[in-house]
């Protein structure tokens, strides 16, 4: 005889078993952990990325050891701590949970690596936009140049792991033998010099010219911006498209135009600058991504301004450099002032060095292009979070943003972030601790040494290991390896 249940549909919390009560307590503790005291980094950057904001971006809304929010902060810690290993990130998550007396994940790093793969690119884009908005709000009038926001564009590349997926999308350079090289992912980015942070990146193959990727970055150029670029971006189409957005540009003249330059043509403004007229090419270039209607909408001609500069190259030889701009008023925009402004384009090279050398992001240890793109987003978020602190420190020290030292600030943050964890839930103490950290950040100033000579040479010799000229499964090591540099 089957027994009929009495008093059905009662909530399990009333007559819960010990196991259910323990599960409910763990769930509540994890929610508290994710919301308030997940890591020292989450507390340090709480004003920029509050827990409520991250929870709103997290579509899964699941509280687990390898949920999106714990994995995000662990991955951020990896990048800030010089591109640390996944094993260290797993150790961070374990320490966070042990500190709250909660069951911590065990085993190898496979669970954490799979969780990184589940972290959606949409989530990272939303977080990046939130950090960029915080940077944008803190721009001071003195950070602008004649009321314009300074931006710069340039390209670089990073190496990926040698896997079939990476090789298919981002093949290795042709100069490297098959099985002996690494896939190379090209990146082109826009940096905001008025606040120091990156606006965004676009990826491409290593053989793709930067100018072909540049139109995809026009979404980061707004009315009233002034874009600095080298001669690779100096084309009629790109300059015209910048003007259509209500922005301005200052670039080095392309080498093809420089070779044909006749300084006697145009309207003379001073011995070093003059006005010239560019006419639209008769045929649309094959590399253009515009439709025929968009190409026809470009102006038939443009009036631009040339400024000639003299300088010494790294070998001490006298050289001339011509920059082109659409800032035509010689009274409001002095030629010498513009030439000094163009020198600030070099800051984007320094920021690329910050990312690739200081953060150790020259090589992405990922097995697929999708993870390479997510790593790029995480790198952008980590760098911009550091710039938020540097921006506030610059305000406190009454200094320009570009005077602040990223390496000094990074060392301070990575060495002191754990001191925030005992202050979880103590808002006044947290605010006081953040203000103390910002006061120290304000002392991390770059040593500005203009006109210093830094030859491109290495002082430390590489170890005398044999070069890998064949795939590893067919490579044979030569004996007496300490005495050779190359194999036969």
Image (cartoon, rainbow, N blue to C red):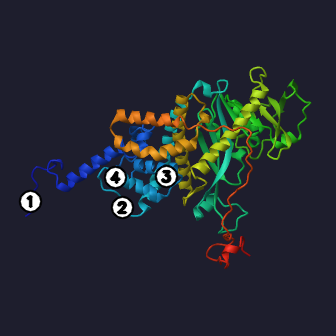
Q: CA distance from mark 3 to mark 2?
A: 19 Å
Residue receiving disc 1:
3
| Front label number (1 vs 4) | 4
Earlier residue among tags 4 and 3: 3
Earlier residue among tags 1 and 4: 1
Q: Which residue is nearer to you in this view: 283 or 23? A: 23
Q: CA distance from mark 1 to mark 2?
A: 43 Å
> SS of the residue at dot 2?
loop
Residue receiving disc 3:
78
Residue receiving disc 2:
106
Q: Furthest residue to the left?
A: 1
| Contact, mark 4 vs mark 3 (Cβ under 8 Å) | no
Residue receiving disc 4:
97
At 55% from the left edge and 30% from the top edge, which residue is drawn? 397
Q: Count of labels shown?
A: 4
Direction from residue 31 to residue 285 in the image, left or right = right
Residue 357, position in %: x, y?
61, 51
Direction from residue 476 to residue 235 in the image, left or right = right
Residue 5 to residue 250: above or below: below
Q: Please state, as top left, top right, bottom left or bottom right, where the N terminus lies in the image.
A: bottom left
Residue 116 to residue 58: above or below: below
Residue 112, position in %: x, y?
43, 57
Q: Which residue is nearer to you in this view: 198 or 336? A: 336
Residue 476 to residue 103: above or below: below
Circle 2 packing at 10 Å, graded few (<14), some (14-19), many (20+), is few
Q: CA distance from mark 2 to mark 4?
A: 11 Å
Residue 312, position in %: x, y?
82, 41
Q: Please state, as top left, top right, bottom left or bottom right, where the C terminus lies in the image.
A: bottom right
């Amino acid at each position: 005889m089957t027994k009929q249940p009495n008093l059905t549909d009662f909530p399990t919390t009333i007559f819960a078993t010990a196991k259910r009560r323990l599960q409910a307590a763990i769930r509540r503790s994890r929610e508290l952990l994710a919301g308030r005291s997940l890591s020292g980094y989450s507390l340090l950057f709480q004003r920029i990325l509050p827990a409520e904001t991250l929870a709103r971006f997290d579509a899964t809304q699941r509280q687990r050891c390898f949920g999106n929010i714990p994995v995000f902060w662990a991955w951020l810690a990896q990048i800030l701590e010089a591109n640390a290993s996944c094993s260290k990130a797993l150790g961070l998550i374990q320490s966070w949970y042990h500190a709250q007396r909660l069951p911590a994940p065990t085993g190898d790093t496979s669970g954490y690596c799979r969780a990184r793969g589940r972290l959606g690119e949409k989530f990272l884009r939303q977080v990046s936009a939130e950090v960029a908005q915080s940077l944008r709000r803190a721009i001071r009038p003195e950070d602008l140049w004649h009321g314009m926001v300074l931006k710069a564009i340039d390209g670089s590349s990073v190496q990926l792991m040698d896997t079939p997926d990476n090789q298919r999308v981002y093949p290795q350079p042709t100069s490297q033998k098959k099985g002996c090289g690494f896939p190379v992912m090209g990146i082109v980015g826009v940096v905001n010099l008025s606040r120091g942070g990156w606006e965004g990146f676009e990826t491409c193959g290593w053989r793709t010219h930067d100018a072909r990727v540049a139109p995809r970055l026009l979404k980061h150029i707004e009315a009233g911006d002034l874009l600095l670029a080298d001669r690779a971006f100096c084309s009629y189409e790109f300059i015209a498209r910048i003007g259509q957005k209500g922005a301005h540009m200052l670039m080095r003249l392309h080498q093809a135009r420089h070779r044909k330059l006749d300084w006697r043509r145009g309207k003379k403004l001073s011995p070093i600058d003059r006005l010239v007229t560019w006419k639209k090419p008769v045929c649309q270039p094959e590399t253009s991504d515009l439709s025929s209607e968009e190409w026809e909408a470009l102006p038939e001609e443009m009036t631009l301004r040339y400024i000639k500069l003299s300088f010494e190259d790294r070998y001490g030889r006298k050289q001339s450099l011509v920059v082109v701009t659409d800032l035509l008023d010689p009274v409001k925009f002095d030629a010498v002032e513009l030439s000094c402004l163009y020198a600030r384009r070099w800051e984007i090279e320094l920021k690329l060095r910050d990312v690739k050398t200081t953060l150790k992001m020259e090589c992405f240890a990922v097995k697929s292009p999708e993870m390479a793109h997510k790593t790029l987003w995480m790198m952008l978020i980590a760098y911009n979070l550091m710039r938020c602190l540097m921006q506030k420190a610059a305000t406190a020290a009454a200094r320009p943003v570009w005077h602040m030292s990223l390496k000094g600030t990074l060392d301070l943050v990575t060495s002191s972030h754990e001191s925030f964890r005992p202050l979880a839930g103590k808002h006044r103490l947290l605010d006081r601790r953040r203000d103390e950290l910002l006061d120290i950040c304000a002392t991390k100033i770059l040593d500005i040494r203009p006109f210093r000579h830094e030859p491109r040479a290495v002082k430390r010799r590489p170890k005398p290991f044999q070069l890998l000229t064949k795939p590893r499964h067919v490579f044979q090591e030569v004996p007496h390896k300490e005495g050779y540099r190359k194999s036969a």
